Image (cartoon, helix red, strand yellow):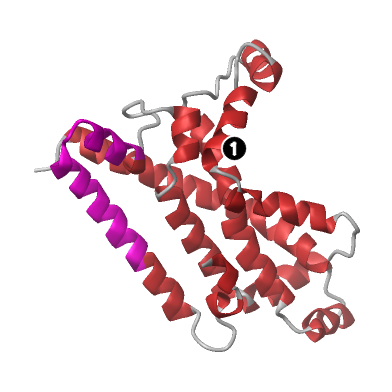
Amino acid sequence: MMDTDFITTLALTGKLAVLTTIILLVIGLPVAYWLAYTHCRVKVVFEALVCMPMVLPPTVMGYYLLLAFNPQKGFGGFLDRFFDVRLAFTFEGILIASVLAGLPFMIQPLQNGLQGLPVSYREAAYTLGKSKTKTFFSVLLPNIRPSVITGIALTFAHTIGEFGIVLMVGGSIPGETRIASIAIYDEVQTLNYRQADRYSLILFLLSFVLLVIIYSINRGPNNYFTNNKHLG
């Protein structure tokens, strides 16, 4: 029989992953559209910023976020003073950290999917009098469904496995910031390998299932992984 702490930790992990994925999908669609079709000179700067979480050590990003969330000064002080909100060592804090860490895992698949569409799709829609918004939702978005699913699956899988940035920003508070990846570390530290095995097995199986879904959906020459081997 599963203990309450085990179930609570898994539920918190799922909650974090679901909310992070939803937020990033809402943010990622317009950002990916802009990056895919803009000719702005500073585009490369934004692309670099989006991809920073892929190359920057999670502890570094976590450290800077922890400084930003400090309720004694700066942004954290502003939130605490005017809104009575504290982000350090709270669920809201690790949610923001997870959103920032997951940016490239959502935006890159969407951007590549949009860039891979023929220009004629947009031109035909504009010729028929469709607005950019209508064209995006009725023409472009349905044609990048595999990229959308890939972005969702990658973001979800990355979030449930996030460790460094969550530990730095949220610590390990049961029921508040202690997600499964943190729990595994804690259990190993206390030599409770049986509990660590249970957490690890669930995360392993979930990650495996998500990858199978991605590869099943994205078969063929337009497979996201085939055209983006640098993510491997």
Residue furthest to the left: 1
Taking the image as shown, residue 214 lies to the left or right of residue 74, namely: left
In screen coordinates, is 119 left or right of 211? right
Q: What's the residue at 84%, 69% (across, down)? A: 131
Provide the residue designation for mark 1: 61
Tell which of 147 and 43 is nearer to you.
43
Residue 44 is situated, as x and y percent measured from the top left of the image, at: 81, 58
Q: Nearer the viewer, residue 183 or 86?
A: 183
Question: Magenta part mainly helix, strand or loop?
Answer: helix
Above or below residue 1? Residue 116 is below
58 lies above or below 22: above
Q: From the image, which quarter does the N terminus lie in? A: top left
Q: Is residue 199 magenta?
A: yes
Q: Residue at x 34, y 67 (%)?
A: 209
Instruction: Give yes or no for residue 223 being in the magenta stretch.
Output: no
Q: Residue at x 49, y 84 (%)?
A: 219
Horizontal side of 96 relative to 30 (left or right) equals: left
Observer-nearest residue: 198 or 123? 198
Residue plotted at (26% across, 54% down): 202
Residue 127 image-quadrant placement? bottom right
Residue range in magenta is 182-209
| Residue 34 vertical position relative to residue 215 in the rendered view, above or below | above
Q: Is residue 54 left or right of residue 50?
A: left
> Where residue 104 appears, x then y in whole percent?
61, 56
Q: Whole-percent x and y of residue 68?
A: 64, 25
Q: Amino acid at mark 1?
A: Met
